[in-house]
Image (cartoon, helix red, strand yellow):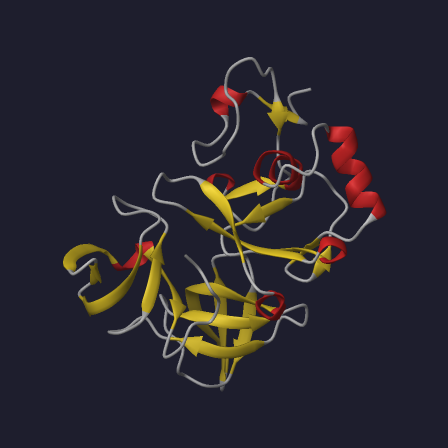
Amino acid sequence: MTKNHLKPQKAPKTWTIKRKNTRFVTRPNAGAHRIELSMPINIVLRNLLGVANTNKEVKKILHDQEVLIDGKRRKDYKFSIGLMDVLSIPKINKHFVMLLNEQNKLFLQPIDKKDSNQKISKITGKKIVKKGATQLKTHDGRTFLVKKDEYQVGDSVLVSLPKQEIKSVLKLEKGATITLYRGKYTGTIATVSEVKNGILTFNKDSKEFETKKVYAIVIEKDKPIMKVK
């Protein structure tokens, strides 16, 4: 039982679930995201989208129709959907990206169909693996081999789905639009005014704030990459 389920009181605070009068919730399979930044499909379809009421209904949906995560069909109800992942249900023409709100809760932000064929991944690691090639590691467990040296830890890359190819780099610099996923200002979407010595200064509602650079994910550059509220 403990392998398949999790007591609600022990579940991450980022999950939107009932914590009373519920004995267990689904324990997600190990995946690319940290557990507090992801949720199993079962909970997403039941609690966030409201398209199912029971595990049995979730399994039927996954069996009968396509549910795509980052462009790939998933049938395991315990598969995790993480921060910045793209969820699509073609049959009902619904598409979403997973974000954190200012209450530090994971939620699904609706996006246009044209935006569902790409996703944003934050670069969290970088190393030279052979002459002329650099390996990038991203927050969602992806790795990319690149030849250009334009990528820095903290930048984001725009990745095509389902091919998983880098389309462009989104630099963490002045003027970039970011979302914050850790720290005091979690869930904030704002514009960078300065990045210096690991500290990021951003503007929101005509006010200036500071936070750690590592708490930010770049989601836009010169023009919106995807429509987020």
* 43 w.r.t. 224: above or below: above
Residue visible at 50% across and 56% down in the picture: 84
Left or right placement of residue 189 versus residue 19 in this view: left
Residue 60 in view (yes/no)? yes
* 188 w.r.t. 223: above or below: above
Residue visible at 31% across and 52% down in the picture: 188
Q: Nearer the viewer, residue 229 or 100?
A: 229
Residue visible at 58% across and 65% down in the picture: 112
Q: Position of residue 228 (x, y in %)?
A: 44, 60
Residue 199 in view (yes/no)? no
Q: Is the N terminus in the top left, top right, bottom left or bottom right quadrant?
A: top right
Q: Is the C terminus in the top left, top right, bottom left or bottom right quadrant?
A: bottom left
Q: Nearer the viewer, residue 29 or 87?
A: 87
Q: Position of residue 88 (x, y in %)?
A: 66, 56
Left or right placement of residue 118 versus residue 127 in this view: right
The answer to which quarter of the image holds residue 86 is bottom right
* 17 w.r.t. 9: above or below: below
Residue visible at 68% across and 27% down in the picture: 4
Q: Position of residue 143 (x, y in %)?
A: 55, 66
Q: Nearer the viewer, residue 190 or 79?
A: 190
